[in-house]
Amino acid sequence: MNNVVKVERPSEAANIAVIVIDNPPVNAIGQDVYEGLLTTFESLAKDSSVSAVVIAAAGRTFIAGADIKLLEQAARGEGGRLYLHPLLEIIETFSRPVVVALHGTSLGGGMELAMSAHYRVASPDAQMGQPEVNLGIIPGAEGTQRLPRLVGIAAAVDMCVSGKPIKAPEALRLGLIDRIIEGDLRKGSIAFAREMATRGSHPRTRDRKEKLGSPELNAPIFAAGREQAAKIRRNMKAPLAAIEAIEAASSLPWEQGLDREREIADRCLASSESRALIHAFFAERGVSKIPDIPKDIRALEIRKAAIVGAGTMGGGIAMALVNAGIPVILKDSDQAALDRGMDAIRKNYDVSVKRGRFTPEIVEQRIAQIHPQLGYDGFQDADLILEAVFENLTLKKQIFAELDKIAGPQCVLASNTSTLDIDAIASATSRPERVVGLHFFSPANIMRLVEIVRGAKTSKELVATALALSKKLGKVGVVVGNCWGFVGNRMMIPYMREAQFLVEEGATPAAVDKALYDFGMAMGIFAVDDMGGIDVMWRVRQERKHLDKPGIRKPLMTDKLYEMGRLGQKTAAGWYRYDENRKPIPDAEVEALIRKTSQEAGIPQRSITPDEILDRCLYIMINEGARILAEGYALRAADIDTIYLSGYGFPGYRGGPMWYADSVGLKTVLDRIVGFHRQHGELWEPAPLLRQLAESGRTFASWDADQEKRFAPQ
Ligand code: 3H9
């Protein structure tokens, strides 16, 4: 026992020892929990008055896994790896029944501990899973050996590759748990333990072989698992490693299986993949920590929302809001646009029904919560009014001036602008402190990122409200400063520009996209441009034309495509052409036009390697990221990583652009940028912060660590 592990002897059943783990917020297994449990079991082993043991946890969840901070230290070689084996051994071989009571989300090491017990019971809404793959590791505390023994090979492979938790009824069906306890879980698990104490023997998971299949039966399951991994976890090693460990469970005796698992788990933990994913985990949880905003500041509750603009963004945001239980008024000034918007919403929901995400009844309920209208009726009662019209500052200011007259005094006035000056928009109102940017990403009902643009006068309460709202919508809200393009788009524009220069110099859009896709990006940049709409970027360029500097190289092709009406997917032609399934097909016509245009502009043609494509696309983005950091528009390099991981399809196993730069080595990145600067001129001017860090042998992560010290209360 210690301060995180306690033993209780319930009055109604003094022969049952109830071990309670109380290690908020999620009862992660750190050294204290591990040692507390081990010493508790050692002492209970000597206590003959105990006829059964229940392991339960206090708070909102049973154990959500091993403490990822310890894993991070071990991955960095700064601490020993937590081996749970002695504890699992003592639980499984305990001479009296051990029952685990599961509630909340029992994950990772929590489930591995539960599987070493003789019995598992759960509350009806409990969920269980092995999400280690999300951290680039495997269930390395004997989970790959016990899980298949309980649920069978196919379900074990699926759980370890997908990382998705299953719900209690499914767990019961698979054999992962023994009973669902309706009502009071503590009382129910004690009653269950009393019942089991009357039995002569208790099942040990390690001895169970009936679900382990045979080599012939298992071979196609493993092959299908590898295929699934290639599809949903492209380029990642951890899901394949988990399958390898489950294969060992199916073919080796228990002890040898454990040795094999340990070997594989150590290999994963030492990988760059796991370091990047662990970084991504903490980066995402760090974004809501804003130095000048106290954690306990009151966020306003958003119970009713209104949206101006029923286009793609407005419609997607309306779906995100009603999916989280917030009714929405959807306003447009044009009936036809409103009808199109509602039609698109319906079609999007139809896809969700087809994919089994929602039932038709749920969809009907959600659609009924979206109220389309032409006027401002009901806006005065909205807690949030969000403007989602196209990128035009004059229009947005006009709308905000109108909203200022209608909205209630407490209302959050938000703009979904993706590039424009939020202070200029706020200046159209009499209450700039109530104005914030909420930059959603398309499709807004799916994409997780929201950039929360904090204007010069945006109140702290509003920022806290925007963060809380993002969480309620199941999204990641990242607070950014008010500069052109904010963080994500400010970095994407040079990336897109560089990709276009590459094609002008001899690459094809397909070759550039392939290099990026192979690197791990969800889509190549030309496919992204076609999806977003070439007219959208054209409009953005028009807004900034007055800033163009003479003598600076400008891409030659996109204006041409726009003028040709090749607007991307929506016209079935852009950088690519598209078939009816929206599959991009390289288009000889565009490639010929690129060659002709570049030759006419006197750009020498050469063959370009995938390495050069990657370096130029990624390093230009990283260089811009370093400027953004130095200028204070992002609080941390890790925030930039979170933006790129949750909104721009950057591969998680590379940790985000800034983490990727650290992993390549900032000196290497700088040297390459200096080379490009010499070759391509002004646009490659190295960012002073990048130069400073690289020349002093430092990393963006170390810069972040210094920032945290600066943020810490004195
Ligand atoms: C593992 O178990 C390895 C084993 O196989 C082998 C071991 C030998 N550790 O997400 P939230 C913190 S690997 C440390 O905002 P929610 C989190 O940082 C692990 N800290 O809440 C945050 O802290 P803060 C396998 C953890 O309600 C706070 O808890 N398990 C851990 O939206 C709240 O988190 C996983 O991968 C942890 N394991 O979601 C599960 N988990 O307040 C990872 C959370 O300081 N966790 N924290 O920012 C999750 O998926 C979600 O946190 C969970 C709650 C669903 C549990």
Image: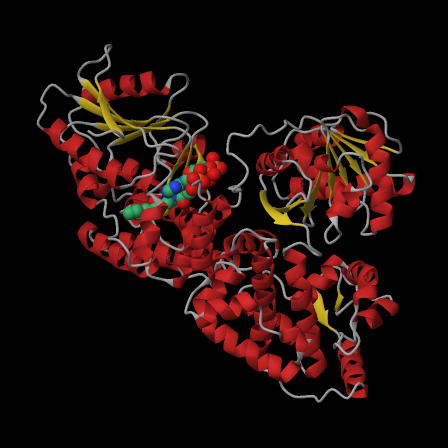
Q: Quadrant of ligand 1?
A: top left
Q: Residue at x 75, y 64 (%)?
A: 579
| 414 versus 559 height, above or below | above
Q: Position of residue 386 (x, y in %)?
A: 75, 38
Position of the C terminus by quadrant: top left
Residue ranking furthest to the top: 12
Residue 264 in picture, x, y percent from top left:
29, 59
Asked which quadrant contains residue 534, the reply is bottom right
In front: 306, or 256? Answer: 306
Q: Which residue is drawn at the image coordinates 20% and 45% (left, top)?
A: 85
Task: Between residue 4 and residue 649, name the one nearer to us.
Answer: 4
- Decide if residue 658 is on the left or right side of residue 36: right
Q: Is residue 182 left or right of residue 6?
A: right
Is 493 rendered above or below residue 131?
below
Image vertical order of residue 553 relative to residue 379, above or below: below
Where residue 544 sits: x, y (%)? 80, 62
Tally of marks:
0
Q: Quadrant of the N terminus?
A: top left
Q: Which residue: 56% across, 76% down?
A: 673
Quarter of the rendering containing residue 9 = top left
What is the basis of the colouring in this image? Answer: secondary structure
- Residue at 50% x, 73% y is 669
Q: Can residue 130 be seen by looking at this rendering?
A: no
- Residue 112, located in which quarter of the rendered image? top left
Q: Is residue 15 left or right of residue 664?
A: left
Is residue 626 visible to us here?
A: yes
